[in-house]
Image (tube, grey):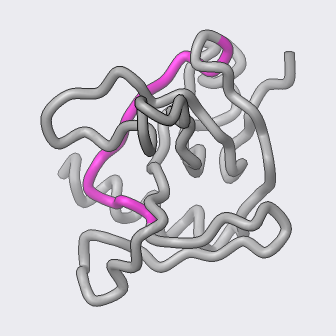
Amino acid sequence: MHIPMRGDIVFIDAEPHAGHEYGGHSTTDQNIRRPMIVLSNNDYNRATGMVIGMVVTSKDFSDNDFYYAFADFESGIKGSVVTWQLPTYDFQARNGEIVGHTSEKLVQELRQRAIAILS
């Protein structure tokens, strides 16, 4: 199994979800996978098999401060990073797949937004 690293772009099975949580796209279409940017550090990911990060929605929320516009041409993922949630997923149990890697600049911006949530 590949261990995701901080800054990796992954697909994760995001169902089931509840309330305001971002889940998969459509359970009726069996499309339950959602892109996510991993923010947890490599040691945590390796030791626990878990990842903490921010999911990406395909909708454009560039006019909203709680989202961050995002596009990765290599993986084809584009939309808005949801910066007001920090979900934790079991990478293997949620059928995680690494599909790309973001810039260190973006990782630092998202980490600052996560710190703002926690402070």
As rendered, which of 28 and 112 lies closer to the eye? 28
104 in relation to 100, above or below: below
**48, above or below 14, in the image:** above
Question: Whole-percent x and y of residue 21?
Answer: 25, 39
Residue 37 part of the magenta segment? no
Q: Residue furthest left?
A: 19
Circle count: 0
Q: Magenta stretch: residue 82 in it?
A: yes
Which residue shows up at 56% across the image and 36% down it?
Answer: 33
Residue 56 horizontal/vertical position (percent): 48, 57
Q: Nearer the viewer, residue 60 or 29?
A: 29
Q: Residue at x 45, y 49 (%)?
A: 54
Stretch of the chain drawn in magenta: 81-92
Q: Position of residue 34 (x, y in %)?
A: 53, 43
Q: Residue furthest bottom?
A: 63
- Location of the N terminus by quadrant is top right
Residue at 71% x, 18% y: name it: 46
Q: Is residue 80 left or right of residue 100?
A: left
Image: 94 above or below 57: above
